[in-house]
Amino acid sequence: MNEPASVLRTPPAVITAGVDLLAQTLRDQAVDVVPVDFTPPAFDDPAVADALATVLADPRRAQANAEAVRRMSDVRAMIVDVVRAGDELGMREGEFFHAGPPITWERASGPMRGGLIGAMIFEGLAADAEEAERRLAAGDGLTWSPCHDHDAVGPMAGIVSPSMYLFKLRDTSTGNTAYCSLNEGLGKVLRYGAYNDEVIARLRWMADVLGPVLQAAVRATGPIDATAIVGQMVQMGDEGHNRNRAGTLMLLREILPALVSSGFPSADIAEVCRFVGANDHFFLNVVMPTGKLMGMAASGIPGSSVVTVMCRNGTDFGIQVSGTGDRWFTGPAGTPVGLFLAGYGEDDANPDIGDSAITETMGIGGMVMATAPAIVRLVGGAVPDALETTARMYEITEGENPAFAVPILEFRGAPTGIDVTRVLRTGILPQINTGMAGRVAGTGQVGAGLVNPPRECFTAAVLALAERVGR
């Protein structure tokens, strides 16, 4: 009979992390120690550390977070209509919505300014960019506010003006409604801050032809199950943020019979089919309001530290948290790292922008990079990086959503319900896939890459949550 191995027969190898007490105690006993220099980020600031301890001790937190994840997973988003923004949301002339938290003209980034300039020209409120910029800088009866304040979301600059058409989605579990503009494609487009004649002509075609034709098709088809399509696309190699190819084609398949029989001129129908079919990102603007509905469902639960919104305006990154409702917590937006289109480089990229981080908030996008190996090079990574990234995201989320199963992880549910306390305890920030807009207004897209939120958002949120403990 073999004797059991003894760890004392050879010199022990000891690695320590965190507080130094264990390492020092071992050194005092002549044991060699290899310390790892790691301190949870929250503990750099005693006030944040105290707030984190207070939130973690909140007896409501575990049940509140479980309820937030349950509500997010129960959302069943249906495409119920395509509507004109001015008619549906009561937008007046000169009123605009934008991506991210609130922003003034003085602090607005180049692509945000470019998007507003283009919307002014598109709405006939300015003859050219110079007049539009002058009126926007002066105010002149013009207003702009976050899409999120109007139950809407918009990619990149996220500009919505009264004449634009929107997807309208409704959640059957809560009755909530969310909206998103129609996707314009890539390159020189308004959402990336471009506003030349080509951009304005495309916007007018979208308002005159694409919107009305899609409206007729969706109304004839009846409610379309967006949540089911998102679940299928994740299993077909789309991560729902930078790759939406399968989702776009599934949507086109759903509405194609109604498009053909809509009664619109055949040339218009053919052009709509060409435009949607050739734009791999078209379904992104359905994924985003699906995520918005999931965030809305989870919002407002006392004691919950689950993130319900992540977005950026090209200057600031903002988050909202369930337990603090629609209060914004902001920090400086980072600049994505990735690949650039021909002719552009790092100096051309604007800091992170857009409401599309709602896809990561709902648990897909960068959170499930493992499901989309086809685009890892597009965003500057490799397949092992994608697998490791998704594995890491489970460390900062409260649960998993079985509706969005990841095949390569044995159909494990998407990591869902980012918890600000887990972010601060681990130092792991959510992973976001994103496009890159040009820093100068009018440039358009310059690339795509990866970015993380600033930690300041999460520390501010935990301080606010601590103030509410016991209420």
Image: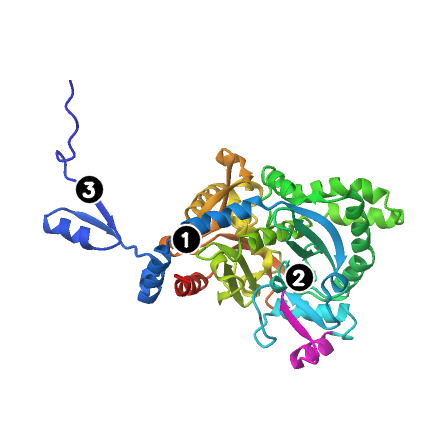
Query: Amino acid type of disc 2?
Result: Arg
> For the residues marked 3 and 2, what is the alpha-carbon distance in whole angstroms?
55 Å
At which x and y percent is residue 165? 75, 58
- Judging by the rendered image, the residue that carries numbered circle 1 is 61
List the single residue furthest toward the front.
471
At which x and y percent is residue 21? 18, 54
If the image is split into quadrants, where does the N terminus sit? top left
Please identify the quarter of the rendering in which residue 88 is found. Answer: bottom right
3 or 2: tag closer to the N-terminus: 3
User: How are the residues colored?
Assistant: rainbow
- Judging by the rendered image, the residue that carries numbered circle 3 is 13
2 or 1: tag closer to the N-terminus: 1
Looking at the rendered image, the disc whose residue lies closer to the viewer, 3 or 1, is 1
Q: Which residues are magenta?
A: 129-146
The reply to whether dot 3 and dot 1 touch (C-beta < 8 Å) is no
Please identify the quarter of the rendering in which residue 157 is found. Answer: bottom right
